[in-house]
Image (cartoon, helix red, strand yellow):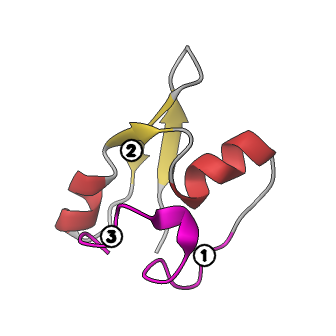
């Protein structure tokens, strides 16, 4: 499963741009969030690719457990 996010002009929030196969509950949870949250945000701030094989145990997804 994959998704595409867009960074806002201020560089503070990511917004879901594409993710046609994401479960609805997850798509809703990640529709817009601070760039400091999740592996997606970490990839932006670190400027590197990050793969999370299990978002239920990945510490970068703290706060998103219910949707995962």
> What kind of element bears circle 1?
loop
Q: Identify the mark at residue 16; answer none if there is no mark.
A: 2
Spatial separation of the CA atoms under disc 3 and disc 2? 13 Å
| Mark 2 neighbour density, 10 Å: few (under 14) some (14–19) many (20 or more) | some
- Of callouts 3 and 2, the N-terminal one: 2
Q: Disc 3 designates what residue? A: 21
Q: Nearer the viewer, residue 22 or 11?
A: 11
Taking the image as shown, residue 57 lies to the left or right of residue 48, namely left
Q: Position of residue 56 (x, y in %)?
A: 42, 82
| Mark 3 neighbour density, 10 Å: few (under 14) some (14–19) many (20 or more) | few
Query: What predominant SS class does the magenta segment belong to?
Result: loop
Q: How many marks?
A: 3
Q: Is residue 58 above or below residue 36?
A: below
Decide whether residue 8 is among the magenta residues: no
Spatial separation of the CA atoms under disc 2 and disc 1? 17 Å
Q: Disc 1 designates what residue? A: 52
Taking the image as shown, residue 58 lies to the left or right of residue 30, namely right
Q: Which of the 4 image quarters holds residue 47?
A: top right
Q: Position of residue 53 (x, y in %)?
A: 58, 84
Q: Position of residue 40 (x, y in %)?
A: 58, 53
Point out the stretch of residues depicted in magenta.
51-68
Residue shown at 31%/45% (left/top)? 31
Q: Identify the mark at residue 44; answer none if there is no mark.
A: none
> What kind of element bears circle 3?
loop
- Of callouts 2 and 1, the N-terminal one: 2
């Amino acid at each position: 499963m994959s998704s595409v996010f867009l960074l806002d002009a201020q560089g503070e929030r990511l917004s879901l741009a594409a993710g046609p196969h994401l479960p609805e509950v997850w798509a809703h949870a990640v529709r817009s969030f601070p760039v400091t949250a999740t592996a997606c945000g970490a990839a932006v701030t670190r400027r590197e690719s990050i793969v999370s094989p299990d978002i239920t145990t990945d510490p970068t997804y703290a706060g998103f457990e219910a949707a995962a």
